[in-house]
């Protein structure tokens, strides 16, 4: 499992070492890891280290010091290094080491930002070392102009320049992932001591590229993480497995209240997602005409009648494809939520729910639906505000409702009411297709039904009992994302329909159970997956 920390947590973990005079040691360790990452980046592009061009954009703080020390190391190995000092001064020891190694220095105050940006765009690698974890408010003045100009120039240069961010891309908030001002998108972010929360939450994750963690000796001082991400080995541990004498009822029964005359396919896709994710039985409750479509598409589904109380299940899925005019379905939705059983509430169910819920109720809004929910609870956020501060929005929704909230997106965030958050980014942009969310609801519903009262392995992914529901939802998001990626790869990386996601879930499930974590995007400085 990947653990991520706020900038404040990282700085507090550094304090015991700083108090003993090891500040320069920490910086040298960070710089050495950064330099080696740049070397690997050059080698991956078939470039020799000797004679390669590296430009470092160096701020006046410790982040700039890390960049300058790394550039000094590279210069000593034969690279042609240039530093652009964006502030009035720079870390004195690091700057001295850089100049002693033969690096050239430009001061932003003494030149036009456009000229320096043009020179940096001709480098093989640009190191972004302007702002660190303590910075707030993003880039301003000439530094903002420099980065904005460079961002425009790099694509025009044919994509031949790799951008490596030092600790995090300048302008990305380490604590939240919020973005201020222009940000130079990185191909690789080399971060120190532990992954930063803002690198795993949108929009910050949009700019981070791949993330590599360099241990610097503070790891034993780190507290409980601010955010977690399940990796392949975690999924293998958490995926439920039937026992030798299991039967369809002991494997979990999921009740599905979904679909409408306008959107019968939503019910079908939700049921397909649930069936593919290992549940023992699916019971469908809905309009007769929708039930007929479900029977034809999913003969395994038992189409029932009556109320929620008349149907014995272990969990409920409610809301997919439902509109405000579906009065009987909305009543079933409310009954399911008050039944005491785990519930995944999607789409049309969200406006019908009580304001106060419980952790075993999993809400699955997209950004627009989450904005509407927050506005109903007294907030002022619109969709743009949610998308610009996803972590704050999902935490706020979980805090206000008392429910577990899953915010769908490129980085899917799952927040428990306690404030604990999981972040999963296992999918592909092709998952943004109609019906994908219905399949996801079905997958999560199936996992909720199988978790039942025996949460077993889910407790291993959480610090307290109520966080287990967030772990279940994160598991569902990861499985759904990986199935979507597999479906796209089966089409040579092209577009997919939602049904293809459901079809690939069993195969993905089987592979997850046996695959190593060789595909993790977050690694330590030795190229090993970070646990």
Image (spheres, rainbow, N blue to C red):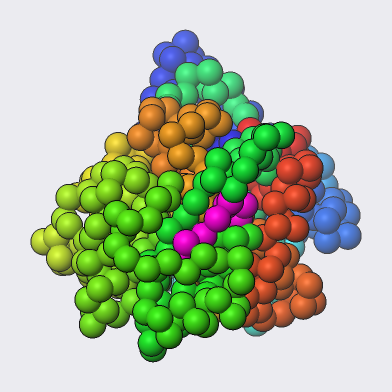
Vertical side of 371 occupied by 214: above or below: above
Whether the magenta-drawn stretch holds residue 280 is answered as: yes
Percent position of residue 299, x then y: 61, 71
Rendering quarter of residue 161: bottom right
Residue 58 shows in the view: no
Percent position of residue 197, x then y: 45, 44
Q: Is residue 147 left or right of residue 525?
A: left
Camera-side residue of 304 and 271: 304
Q: Is residue 496 left or right of residue 357?
A: right
Whether the magenta-drawn stretch holds residue 43 is answered as: no
Residue farthest left in this picture = 378
Percent position of residue 460, x then y: 53, 28
Percent position of residue 162, x then y: 69, 62
Q: Split into 4 quadrants, where in the image is the C terminus?
A: top right
Query: Residue shown at 38%/28% (left/top)?
Result: 464
Q: Split into 4 quadrants, where in the image is the N terminus?
A: top right
Camera-side residue of 399 and 175: 399
Camera-side residue of 328 and 398: 328
Query: Residue shown at 47%/11% (left/top)?
Result: 20
Residue farthest top in this picture = 20
Query: Residue shown at 41%/42% (left/top)?
Result: 469
Q: Which residues are magenta?
A: 277-284
Residue farthest bottom in this picture = 262
Query: Residue shown at 29%/44% (left/top)?
Result: 340
């Amino acid at each position: 499992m990947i653990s991520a920390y706020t900038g404040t947590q990282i700085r507090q973990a550094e304090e015991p070492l700083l108090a003993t005079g090891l500040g320069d040691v920490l910086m040298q360790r960070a710089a050495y890891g950064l330099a080696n990452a740049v070397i690997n980046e050059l080698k991956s592009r078939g470039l020799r280290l000797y004679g390669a061009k590296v430009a470092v954009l160096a701020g006046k703080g410790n982040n700039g010091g890390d960049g300058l020390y790394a550039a000094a190391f590279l210069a000593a190995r034969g690279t042609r290094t240039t530093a652009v000092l964006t502030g009035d001064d720079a870390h004195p020891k690091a700057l001295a080491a850089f100049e002693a190694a033969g690096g050239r220095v430009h001061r932003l105050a003494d030149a036009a930002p456009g000229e320096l940006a043009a020179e940096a765009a001709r480098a093989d690698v640009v190191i972004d070392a302007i702002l660190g974890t303590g910075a707030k408010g993003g880039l301003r003045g000439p530094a903002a102009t420099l980065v904005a100009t460079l961002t425009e120039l790099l694509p025009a240069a044919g994509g031949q320049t790799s951008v490596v961010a030092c600790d995090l891309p300048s302008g990305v908030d380490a604590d939240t992932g919020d973005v201020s001002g222009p940000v130079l998108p990185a191909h690789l972010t080399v971060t120190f001591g532990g992954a930063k929360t803002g690198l795993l939450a949108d929009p910050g994750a949009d700019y981070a590229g791949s993330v590599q963690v360099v241990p610097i000796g503070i790891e034993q001082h780190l507290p409980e993480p601010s955010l977690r991400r399940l990796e392949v080995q975690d999924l293998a541990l958490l995926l439920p497995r039937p026992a030798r004498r299991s039967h369809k009822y002991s494997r979990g029964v999921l009740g599905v209240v979904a679909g409408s005359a306008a959107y019968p396919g939503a019910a079908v896709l939700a049921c397909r997602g649930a069936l593919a994710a290992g549940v023992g039985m699916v019971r469908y409750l809905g309009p007769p005409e929708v039930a007929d479509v479900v029977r034809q598409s999913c003969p395994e589904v038992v189409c029932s009648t009556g109320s929620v109380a008349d149907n014995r299940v272990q969990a409920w899925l409610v809301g997919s494809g439902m509109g405000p005019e579906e009065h009987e379905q909305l009543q079933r939705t409310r009954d399911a939520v008050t039944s005491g059983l785990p519930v995944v509430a999607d789409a049309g169910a969200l406006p019908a729910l009580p304001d106060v819920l419980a952790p075993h109720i999993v809400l699955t809004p997209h950004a627009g639906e989450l904005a509407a929910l927050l506005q109903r609870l007294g907030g002022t956020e619109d969709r743009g505000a949610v998308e610009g501060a996803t972590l704050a929005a999902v935490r706020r929704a979980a805090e206000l409702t008392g429910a577990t909230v899953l915010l769908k997106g490129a980085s899917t965030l799952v927040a428990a009411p306690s404030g604990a958050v999981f972040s999963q980014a296992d999918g592909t942009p092709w998952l943004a297709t109609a019906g994908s969310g219905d399949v996801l609801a079905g997958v999560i519903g199936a996992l909720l039904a199988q978790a039942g009262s025996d949460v077993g392995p889910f407790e291993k992914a959480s610090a307290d009992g109520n966080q287990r529901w967030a772990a279940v939802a994160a598991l569902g998001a990861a499985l759904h994302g990986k199935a979507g990626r597999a479906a796209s790869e089966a089409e040579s990386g092209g577009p997919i329909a939602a049904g293809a996601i459901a079809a690939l879930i069993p195969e993905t499930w089987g592979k997850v159970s046996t695959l190593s974590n060789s595909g993790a995007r977050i690694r330590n400085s030795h190229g090993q997956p970070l646990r």
